[in-house]
Amino acid sequence: MSVPASAGVPGALDGRVVLVVGASGGLGEAASLACAEAGASLVLLGRRVPKLNRLHDRLQKAGAAPALYPLDLEGATPDDHAELAARIDAEFGRLDGIVHVAAAFEGLTPLELTDPATFARALHVNLTARWWLTQACLPLLRRSGDGSVVFAIDDPARTTGAYWGGYGLAQAGLSALVGMLQAELGDAPVRVSGLLPPPMRTPLRAKAHVEAEDRVARSPVEVAAHCVALLSPAGAPHRGQLWSPGAVLPA
């Protein structure tokens, strides 16, 4: 598994403000802890307040002082995302990175039998809401001088097969978004990348695999260093790319 030398090194994110979207999830919690260890000031966004509070307490015991931002991406409007950006600006005066690890997945279902509301929710939370939030924060990221947006993407080569429904289609859309947005940003001081993590032992994966028989899944802690790498200056070579540990795929 290839990781840039600075990944996971204390100080790799010193002076940077990072927004973790989906901080209360499996990878979100691991990424938050890794970013704090690397020196980032954190804004933790999630919809489960009790989990956010527990993560806040854990980070505080480790010497961090994260800000909490409870928000349900399913019901949030573009105005809500604009308010988020404004509040980060007022509180920190900057935003240097966003790592998108929030996800919605209800399980494997044939398209023909998928509830329309479930299909729409999967597309919105996994794709549309990610873009709305990023769009609202782009002006702040430009001011950073080295802004970074990291989208965690479930490998479309696997999730565009049968039964993955709106979730799988959203992963394909995210893959296209990385290349499209970077092409439009050009040489702007904002870089966009996609992280294709290996299978992880998380509640989301358990909805599609029997945990007792899942021999390939890894701990999200192993993947968190890759989030830090892409958010840090070491992630610059992955601008506009989908990065799978050990390989780089064209966006």
Image (cartoon, rainbow, N blue to C red):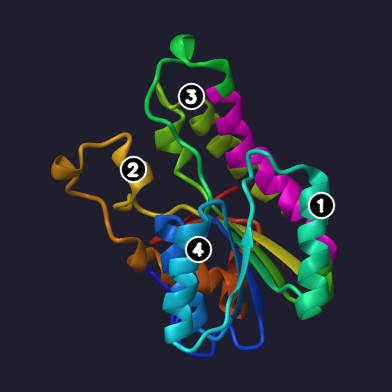
First in sequence: mark 3 vs mark 1: 3
Q: Residue at x 45, y 76 (%)?
A: 57
User: Gap in Å between the C-alphas at discs 2 and 4?
Assistant: 21 Å
- Looking at the image, which residue sits at the far left? 212
Q: CA distance from mark 4 to mark 3?
A: 29 Å
Mark 2 nearby-residue class (10 Å; few <14, some 14–19, many ≥20):
some
Query: In the image, is residue 212 part of the stretch drawn in magenta?
Result: no
Please identify, in this view, whether the residue under mark 2 or under mark 4 is nearer the observer. Answer: 4
Secondary structure under tag 4 reads helix
Sequence-wise first label, 2 or 4: 4
Per the image, label 2 sits on a secondary structure element best described as helix
Q: Which residue is mark 2?
A: 205
Which region shows up in magenta? 118-139
Can residue 80 be seen here? The reply is yes
Q: Residue 203 vs residue 150: left or right? A: left
Q: Are marks 4 and 3 in contact (CB under 8 Å)?
A: no
Disc 1 element: helix
Mainly helix, strand or loop, the magenta region? helix
In the image, residue 167 sits, relative to residue 222, either above or below, namely above
Q: Mark 4 — residue? A: 52
Instruction: Report the Cα–Cα distance between label 4 and label 1.
Output: 34 Å
The Cα atoms of the two marked residues, 2 and 1, are separated by 33 Å
Sequence-wise, the earlier of marks 4 and 1 is 4
Q: Is there a contact, CB below 8 Å, between mark 2 and mark 4?
A: no
**Which dot, 4 or 3, sits closer to the camera?**
4
The foreground one among 129 and 1 is 129
Residue beneath disc 3: 165
* Dot 4 or dot 3, earlier in sequence: 4
Q: Of callouts 3 and 2, which one flags the residue occurring earlier in the amino acid sequence?
A: 3
Q: Position of residue 120 (x, y in %)?
A: 61, 25
Considering depth in this image, is 228 or 186 the residue closer to the camera? 228
